[in-house]
Amino acid sequence: MWSEIIGKFKGMPSQEKVIRVLLERGFQVNAEGHVVSGAIEIPHTQIAKEVGVDRRVVDATTEMILKDEVLKRVFMNIRSIASLRDVAPMLGLGVIIITPDNAQNVGIITDVTSVIARYNLSIRQAVTDDPFFSDDPKMTLITNDVIPGELVSDLRKLKNVRSVTIL
């Protein structure tokens, strides 16, 4: 599906940059062509600045989204999520960041969460990077308690895990 969405902007590299940012951040496009997160409008000039394009490129991208039924359906319904990663240590929660050998392999989440469950840790949040958008995708898990060292050792033994980072 992602390649189909990006493919609609083939030959338009500036608009493709805008589409990628909208998808990565989970920003919606409303019926008026405004970029929003929930009910908060994000000025096209700010998106243009982030992407390194002219504001009119953002305008043209949102117009194209509204004219295409597939794009419209996706961008009117996508949602962003809040990640606890950077605040979890302040809240007494554990953070495990897994870098897989190949994020498209089957069973990585199952293998990792099975090991965590053996340590009787509850996973409060799990967020994975989409390998389509990230060159180095990671899985971030927030647990209800700090991470014991033995858990890290066990996670490193998994066949699909390249590295384990604890925050």
Image: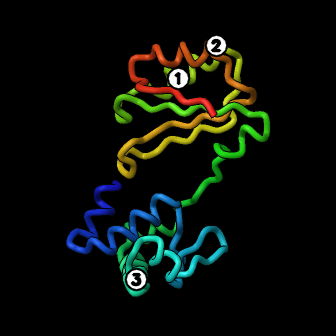
Q: Hey, which residue is sitting farthest left in the picture?
A: 11
The residue wearing badge 3 is 63
Badge 3: residue crowd in 10 Å (few <14, some 14–19, many ≥20): some
Instruction: Identify which amino acid the numbered label 3 is placed on.
Output: Glu
**Residue 90 image position (x, y, % from top left):** 77, 41
Badge 1 vs badge 3, beta-carbon distance below 8 Å? no
Question: Which dot, 1 or 3, sits closer to the camera?
Answer: 1
Element type at marker 1? helix
Residue at the spot 78% in from the left edge and 34% down from the top edge: 92
| Left or right of residue 102: residue 89 | right
Separation of disc 2 and disc 1 at Cα? 10 Å
**Residue 126 image position (x, y, % from top left):** 59, 38
Element type at marker 2? helix
**Residue 105 image position (x, y, % from top left):** 35, 29
Label number found at residue 112: 1
Q: Could you say which is closer to the camera, residue 164 or residue 81? A: 164
| Left or right of residue 120: residue 132 | left
Badge 2 vs badge 3, beta-carbon distance below 8 Å? no
Separation of disc 1 and disc 3 at Cα? 42 Å
**Residue 15 image position (x, y, % from top left):** 33, 74
Q: Hey, which residue is sitting farthest bottom in the picture?
A: 56
Residue at the spot 54% in from the left edge and 33% down from the top edge: 97
| Left or right of residue 78: residue 40 | right
Dot 2 or dot 3: first in sequence order is 3
Instruction: Identify which amino acid the numbered label 2 is placed on.
Output: Arg
Above-or-below relation of 139 to 112: below
The residue wearing badge 2 is 118
Instruction: Identify which amino acid the numbered label 1 is placed on.
Output: Val
Separation of disc 2 and disc 3 at Cα? 50 Å
Above-or-below relation of 51 to 86: below
Element type at marker 3? helix
Dot 1 or dot 3: first in sequence order is 3
